[in-house]
Image (cartoon, rainbow, N blue to C red):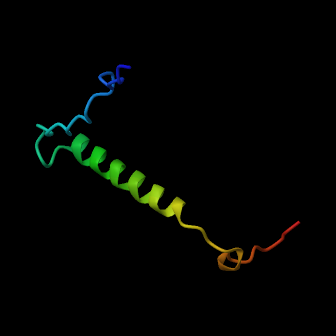
């Protein structure tokens, strides 16, 4: 019996080097957005107990 090979799955593509200048506003915005998204996903992974939630004030 012939063993299946996974040729359809390619190796992960290496990140392309950014050719824009270091102080380019679009590049800075992209890097900041990526950092914010990474930090947000790390924070979402952490579980907090309800005791750490601040009390809410009920105002009718």
Q: Position of residue 40 (x, y in %)?
A: 46, 57
Q: What residue is at 84 percent from the left and 69 percent from the top?
A: 59
Q: Where is residue 55 in the image (x, y as percent from the top left)?
A: 74, 77
Q: What residue is at 13 percent from the left and 39 percent from the top?
A: 17
Number of numbered discs overlaid on the protein picture = 0
**Is 1 displayed left or right of 60 in the figure?**
left
Q: Position of residue 50 (x, y in %)?
A: 71, 74
Q: What residue is at 17 percent from the left and 36 percent from the top?
A: 16
Q: Tell me if residue 37 comes above or below residue 50 in the rendering.
A: above
**Is 35 displayed left or right of 40 in the figure?**
left
Q: Which of 19 and 46 is in front in this view?
A: 46
Q: In what quadrant of the picture does the N terminus appear?
A: top left
**Is 45 displayed left or right of 60 in the figure?**
left
Q: Nearer the viewer, residue 12 or 42?
A: 12
Q: Tell me if residue 52 comes above or below residue 27 in the rendering.
A: below
- Of all residues shown, which one is farthest toward the right? 60
Q: Tell me if residue 8 comes above or below residue 23 in the rendering.
A: above
Q: Tell me if residue 55 comes above or below residue 13 in the rendering.
A: below
Q: What residue is at 59 percent from the left and 68 percent from the top?
A: 47
- Of all residues shown, which one is farthest toward the front? 1
Q: In what quadrant of the picture does the C terminus appear?
A: bottom right
**Is 49 displayed left or right of 16 in the figure?**
right
Q: Where is residue 27 in the image (x, y as percent from the top left)?
A: 22, 43
């Amino acid at each position: 019996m012939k063993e299946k090979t996974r040729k359809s799955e390619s190796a992960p593509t290496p990140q392309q080097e950014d050719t824009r200048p270091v102080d380019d506003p679009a590049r800075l915005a992209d890097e900041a957005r990526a950092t914010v998204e990474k930090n947000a996903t790390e924070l979402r992974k952490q579980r907090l107990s309800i005791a750490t939630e601040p009390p809410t004030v009920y105002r009718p």
